Image (cartoon, rainbow, N blue to C red):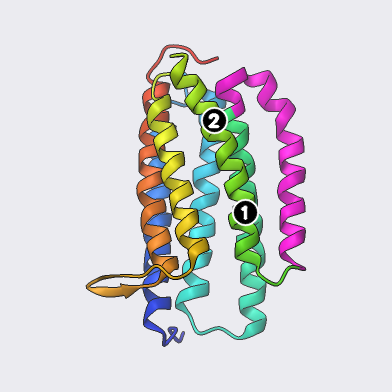
Amino acid sequence: MIFNPAITELTTAATDLLLAVVSLGCLAVLRRSRRTHGQRVAIWSWVFGLLAFASLLGALAHGLALSPAVESWLWRPLYLSLGLVVAMFVVGAVFDLRGAHAARAWSVPMLVLALGFFTVTQVGSDNFMIFVVYEAVAMLGTLGIYLLLAWQRRLAGAWTVAAGILLNIVAAAIQANGTISLTIIFPLDHNGVFHLVQLVAIIVLARGLAHGMAQKSVP
C-alpha cells in the first residue's frame, strides 16, 4: 500500500475519514429513537450510513496512490452513494413535512433521479461539480421545507436542521469555488475545508433531528 505523495490529498483523505467516523456516530445517536420513530430513523439512517460509506471510499481515493483504472472503479460506488444520500435526504424532508405516505410516494422518483445523476457522472468531464449542482438544488429545497416547519412550529429542532442544511450549502459553495485553502498544522485545500465545514453541518443536522425525535409523535 502506497500513500499519495501530495500532502493536500492526504489531508483530504484524513478529513474524509473523520467525516465517515462522525457520520457513523450521528447514525448511532439517531438509532436510539428507532422504537418510537422507526420510519423516520430508517430514512435518516440511510443518509448517514451512505455518507459514511462514501466518505470512506473518498479517503481511499484521495489517500492512496492508485492506478487510473482502480481509481475510476472506486469513484463509481462513491458517486452512486452520494447520489443516494441526496435522494434520501429529500425523502426525509418530505417525511417531516407531509408524513410517511408522502415520503413513500417520493422514494421511487428520488431513487430514479439518483440513478440518473450517477449515470451522468459516468459520462461527464467534471463529475464532482455535477454532484455539487445536484446537491445544491436538493439542499435549497429541503432548506425551504425546514424553514417552513420551523416558522409554523410544527417540528421541534427544525431551526437546527435548517442551520445544518445551510452549513452544508456553504460547504458545497467552498468546494465549488475551488480556491479556498486553510492550514491547521497541515495544509488543507478546498476539498479538505469542504469536509470540515460539512462535518460541522452533519453534527448540527443530527442534533436537530434528535431534538425532533424527542417528541412523542411525528407527522
Q: Residues within 10 Å of mark 1 (few under 14, many from 20)?
A: some
In magenta segment, residue 102: yes
Residue tagged by mark 2?
144
Element assignment for label 1: helix
Question: Which quadrant would the C terminus be assigned to in this image?
Answer: top right
In magenta segment, residue 98: yes
For residue 209, above or below residue 218: below
Q: Where does residue 117 sit, x and y in percent of width and height?
A: 72, 54
From the image, give the main secondary structure of the stretch colored magenta. Answer: helix
Q: Where does residue 215 sit, x and y in percent of width and height?
A: 40, 15
Image: magenta residue range: 94-123
Query: What amino acid type should be assigned to the residue bearing mark 2?
Result: Gly
Element assignment for label 2: helix
Q: Nearer the viewer, residue 145 or 31?
A: 145
Q: Nearer the viewer, residue 155 or 107?
A: 155
For residue 72, above or below residue 160: below
Going 43% across and 32% down the picture, which residue do you hit?
161
The tag earlier along the polypeptide, 2 or 1, is 1
Mark yes or no: residue 99 visible. Answer: no
Q: Indicate left or right for 60 with 108 as reference.
A: left
For residue 168, above or below residue 30: below
Going 54% across and 30% down the picture, which residue do you hit?
144
